[in-house]
Structures are given as structure tokens and as C-alpha cells.
Amino acid sequence: MNTPSIYGLTLDQLEAWLLEQGQKKFRAQQIWDWLYIKRVLEFSEMTNLSKDLVALLSDNFLLQPLNQVVVQESADGTTKYLFQLEDKLMIETVLMRQEYGLSVCVTTQVGCDIGCTFCASGLKRKQRDLTAGEIVAQIMQIQHYLDQKGNGERVSHIVVMGIGEPFDNYDNVMAFLNIVNHAKGLAIGARHITVSTSGLAPKIREFAENGLQVNLALSLHAPNDEIRSRMMRINRKHPLKEVMSAIDEYLEKTNRRITFEYIMISGVNDRPEQAQELVALLKDKRHLSYVNLIPYNPVAEHIKYERSTKKDILAFYDILKKNNINCVIRKEHGTDIDAACGQLRSKHLEKAAK
């Protein structure tokens, strides 16, 4: 990375940088107003700044660090973006239209090293972490797209569930959360933001201490170590006992509900006995648990996996509900485009390599 994105600076960091450059501290708020309220596309549009300050910003920061390569729009309004970074690497971002507003799923790493056998993101090993600015820029790029449509729509929710493991890029993700949540910036409410982890237990404990009211989701996907270790390599390093202990600590310190993501894969984790195991795993925390049953989006490279039947998903759901486990079958988005996380990027890279 040669030139950082200005979106990566918190308001305090921007104030400090301006003071180091001999500028007035109050200019930071003016710049943030241009970035997040007026949402300009060029530094030259910041008309209440001096030409010297505009030149200083242009020399030191990127305002648009992402180049749009591909856009896929689903019949249900879901829009998937393939962005190219300054160093030519590729990432994905997804805009989803929900009943409660517009939600954006952001990527935090180029590739992923967690090793989930069902996931298109894991087909390409991690090349690097994204900076905070590159993560914020995903939100801004989509907000600019909405602004251009001129109907007043705003990104209202964020899910940190795209390519990569957010807690493997912890510092940049936390900076991102603070920037998009800040009242003088995008002001996206903390309770409208969800961060998903595959189970990095030490970082779950650290996250419990941060004081943000951001939601936490755990990519669980299996009720026992034998199945989970086959599906997710990370479970060999952080087995369920360790992960659930960290979850207990998180619940005790925050008293906030946690979502357990559970991808339904035929013959792997969707049997009634596995539903009963999941009930046993969550029974002592069911008052603060919410299970999200996710129909699997098949990935061509993972031909050994198939989506659970509707009948099996409903049977699994019924067992959880009868045992007082809060759960829902997730509504699908973008099934007529490359719906699986990382799928659009993988296809593009394979095509480019031919």
C-alpha cells in the first residue's frame, strides 16, 4: 500500500494529523462533513478548505481507493460488487435490501486462511489484511451509488461477514467500526452493525471488553468438534469448549444476544440428532441465543456438499423451536447471481488466469 485512504482515519487521528501539518484542529470536522455528510468524490469539492489544504490532502491520501470491476444485480435487488484495490487485488462487497433497511456486507481480508471447506472465500489463501480505510470505502462506494440514484436511500445496517475473518484483522476492523458508528460521520447505530467470527476465542474475549454495542455472530455450523473440525479447520486450534467458554464470558460481560450462524449441508450437519446436540450446546444460554439456519449456496469447487432439503431444514428448525431455542431460517438473497461469499471473486480470478 502506497497511499492510504483518508477514510481510514478516525476523527481524533485526522485532528492529530492536521495539527502535525500546521493546520487548525477544527478543519477535521469540516473534512469529515465533506466525506460523510456531503459525501464528495474529490478533495477539490471541499470548497471551504484552502487550496493548500486541499493539495495537502490530495498528496497524502486517496479519496476513492476502490475501482469497481463487476456489478451483479439480482432480481430481488441484492447487488454484488467486485472491487479492485490500489495494488490490483480483488474484494467483494454486497448490498442487500431488507425489510428493515439497506444492509451492506463488507470484506475484511483479501482471501482467507480460516479453512472452511464449504466456503468460496477459502478457495484463495489470504494475501493481506484490508486497512480500515479500505473497509470504510466499501460502505462509501455503495452509498455513492445510492446517492447517484437520487432517491435518498442510505445504508442503514452493516454486516462484517464478507471475505476473511474479521478478528484476524482485529485492529483495522475495530477502527472501521468506530468510524462508521461515529455520530459526526455516517452515524450507523452500533446495534445496526454485526461482526461475525469463525471462533477466534481470544479475540471474542477482547471484543467483550471494547464497550461498543455492536452485535456479535459466531459461525458455528456444527454442534460437535468432530463435524466442526471437518468443516472448519479453525476448530482444531480453537475447539468448541474453548469457543463456547469465550462466548459465555462475552454474554456475562455484555448481556447482549449472540447469533449462531448454521449453514445447512445435506448429510453433514442437518440430521435430527445434530439438532438435539445443538439444543444441548445452547440450552444454558438460550435466553441470549439466536440461531440463524442458512440454506447452503453450493460452490462448484465443493462438489461434495449439497444443500439440505427444505424438509430437513424445517425438521431441524422444529426441533430447535420445541426446545425453546430462538431460531429462524434465513431469507435468501441473490440466488440468481454468484450468491456464495467469495464466489464472484474466485470466478473472476480463474477467468483472468486462463
Image (cartoon, rainbow, N blue to C red):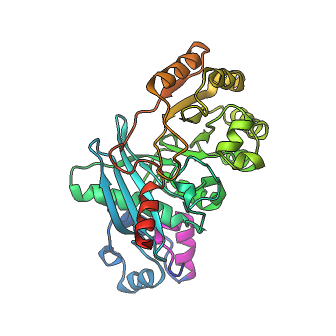
Q: Quadrant of residue 141?
A: bottom left
**The magenta segment:** 4-20
Quadrant placement of the N terminus: bottom right
Residue 255, position as x, y percentages in the image: 66, 31
Residue in the image at 50% along x and 57% along y: 107
Q: Nearer the viewer, residue 213 or 130?
A: 130
Q: Nearer the viewer, residue 19 or 136?
A: 136
Residue in the image at 35% along x and 67% along y: 68
Residue 21, position as x, y percentages in the image: 53, 83
Residue 73 highlighted magenta (yes or no): no
Residue 18 highlighted magenta (yes or no): yes
Q: Main secondary structure of the magenta part?
A: helix
Above or below, comparing residue 25 to residue 337 in the picture: below
Quadrant placement of the C terminus: bottom left
Whether residue 228 is visible here, answered yes or no, is yes
The residue lying furthest to the top in this view is 322
Whether residue 29 is visible here, answered yes or no, is no
Above or below, comparing residue 9 to residue 285 in the picture: below
Above or below, comparing residue 186 to residue 305 in the picture: below
Above or below, comparing residue 56 to residue 256 in the picture: below
Residue 251, position as x, y percentages in the image: 69, 33
The residue lying furthest to the left in this view is 150
Residue in the image at 52% along x and 77% along y: 18
Q: Nearer the viewer, residue 265 or 175?
A: 265
Q: Quadrant of residue 204?
A: top right
Q: Is 129 displayed left or right of 54 in the figure?
A: right
Q: Is 166 displayed left or right of 277 in the figure?
A: left
Residue 182, position as x, y percentages in the image: 49, 54
